[in-house]
Image: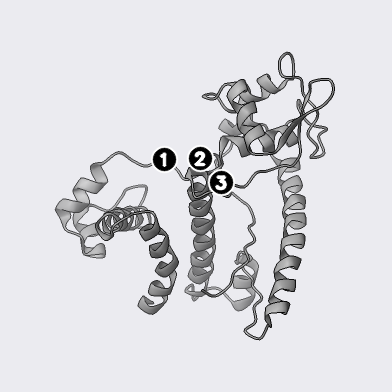
Amino acid sequence: MLAALATILKPTVRLLLQSGVSYSVFASVAKSVFVQVASEDNKRRGRFPNFSEVSAMTGISRREVSKIRKSKDQDRWTPSMETSPINTILHEWHFDSDFSDQSGGARPLPFEGEKSFSELVSRYVHDISPGAMRAALHKAGVLIEDSQGRLLVTQPYSYSRKFDEDFIRGLAFSASNLGSTLFYNASLHQRAELSDEEIRGLARLERGVWSERLTGEGAARFREWVGQTAPRFLAEADKVIGANEFPQNAAVHHSPRAIGVGIYYYEED
C-alpha cells in the first residue's frame, strides 16, 4: 500500500512543487483530510467518533484533532463548485428549454429581453454580469454573433489551456472522482459476504487499455484516434445527462449526488 501511495503521490507532488506549495503546507492539508475521513467514515447512528477515537485511528494528537474538527466545515465538493461559470452557462444554454432546442442544441439568443442571454446569465451565475460573461465567452473563443446581433455558441464546453484557477479546479475534480471510483471498487472486494457476480454488478466502470510496444508513429496514431473519438463519446454522454437532469429549481426535492463519466489519455513520464 505504501509503495502504491508513493506512485499515486508522485504526479501530485510534482504539481505542488511547480505551484510553489511546500511540504509543510501539504502535510497540514493531509492532516486535516485524515481527521475528516476518519470522522466521516466511522460515524455511528449519526454521531461522529470523539476526539480520542479519531486520534487513535489516525495517530494525530487529540489536541490537533480537536482543533481541526472545530474549524469551519468545508462545503461539499460538487460539480457546480468545480465547474467554471463559463461551462455552467454553456451547459444550461444547451439544455435549459428556455434557451435550447431541448435536444442539446443552443439557440441563438438576443443579448437582452425575454429568454435572452442576460436572462440566462442572471438565472445561473448570480455574481457575474451579462456583459462580463459575454466578454469571457468571447475570450474563451466559444461565442460569436450573427448578422442580427444574436449570440451563438460554437461548442458545449470550454477547456482552460492555461495553468490557472479553472485548470486547477478541473484537475482536482477529475482526480478526486477517479480516486473515489477506485476506492469504491476496492472496498467491494473487501466485503466477504459478496459473491464475484454481485461485486461485478455493483462495481463502477473503470477500464483501461495500454501497451509498451508502440513505435513513435504508432503512438502518434493512437493519440490522434483518442483525440478524435473521445470528444464524440463525451458529447453524446453530455446530451444524455442534459436530457435527464431535473430543473435547477427542483433541486431542493432531491439529495445532491454527482454522477458522471470521464476519459483520460496517459503516457508514462
Residue 33 left/right relative to 11: left
Q: Quadrant of residue 57?
A: bottom left
Q: Earlier in the sequence, mark 1 or mark 3?
A: 1
Q: How is the image coloured?
A: one colour
Q: Distance between the Cα atoms at labels 3 and 2?
A: 13 Å
Q: Looking at the image, is mark 1 or mark 3 nearer the viewer? A: 1
| Residue lying at 49% horizontally and 62% vertically, measured from the top left | 179
Secondary structure of the residue carrying numbered label 2 = helix
Could you tell me the amino acid type at mark 3?
A: Arg
Q: Earlier in the sequence, mark 1 or mark 2?
A: 1
Residue 137 - label: none
> Circle 2 is placed at which residue position?
81
Q: Earlier in the sequence, mark 3 or mark 2?
A: 2
Secondary structure of the residue carrying numbered label 3 = loop
Q: Looking at the image, is mark 1 or mark 2 nearer the viewer? A: 2
> Circle 3 is placed at which residue position?
257
User: Looking at the picture, how far across and down is residue 252, in whole percent?
Assistant: 56, 31
> Circle 1 is placed at which residue position?
75
| Residue lying at 61% horizontally and 21% vertically, measured from the top left | 131
